[in-house]
Image (cartoon, helix red, strand yellow):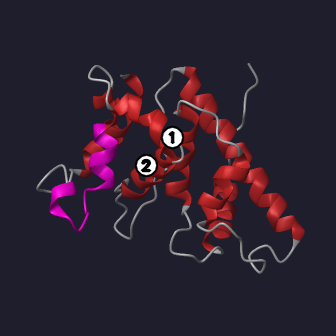
Amino acid sequence: MVSFQPLTDAELDRLSEILSRFGTKDAMNLEQLDGFLAALIAGPDDVLPSEYLPEIWGDGMVNEDTFHAQPILQDFLSLVTRHWNAVSQMLRSGNVYTPRLLENEQGVSHANDWANGFLRGMELRREEWARLLNDEENGGSLVPIFALAHEHDPDPELRSYDKPIARNCVKSLLSDWRRE
């Protein structure tokens, strides 16, 4: 088995900076990207880069100013591919997958963006994921992800809990879906 080196902190910072250049409201941040890739990798069908890259930058067309120089585009594609490979290796290894979570100003990771990224990945293969969701034996494994994704939804009907999820439970919730 080929071993893929996870991105270094400097490379993650570079990827995060490139993601911030997209500037659309639907463009992903690093945490969303990590959840998105996890869903694509764990999903029932392969998804080609030509299909998932526009979802990352949040638009069918990328603003040419974002990639004003060819090296930035190449760097972006290289970093996304390496991150894909590292996440894939971790998910397929059977080891506990630790999501890439961003911290707020107080140093707290909420994981809502990761969960929303995961749901965006599921959306690319909605019908195939629906089979798992409707499976009584295994469908419950996705409940923690839906709970985090909708934790602060303006529609109270979509929230799984009446109070925010305790922050010390977030990583545990996310790692549980992988084990079931």
Overall secondary structure of the magenta section: helix
Q: Between residues 30 and 162, which one lies in front from this camera angle?
A: 162
Q: Is residue 69 above or below residue 41?
A: below
**Amino acid type of the residue tagged 1 in the rendering:** Ala
Residue 22 place in picture, x, y as percent: 64, 73
Q: Which residues are magenta?
A: 143-158
Identify the residue under disc 2: 119
Is the residue under label 2 in contact with that under label 1 (CB below 8 Å)? yes
Identify which residue is drawn at 77% across, 81% down: 65
**Amino acid type of the residue tagged 2 in the rendering:** Leu
Residue 116 located left or right of residue 170: right
Residue 62 place in picture, x, y as percent: 71, 71
Q: Which type of secondary structure does the marked residue at label 2 adopt?
A: helix
Identify the residue under disc 1: 39
Which quadrant does the N terminus fall into? top right
- Among numbered discs 1 and 2, the one appearing first in the sequence: 1
Residue 59 marker:
none
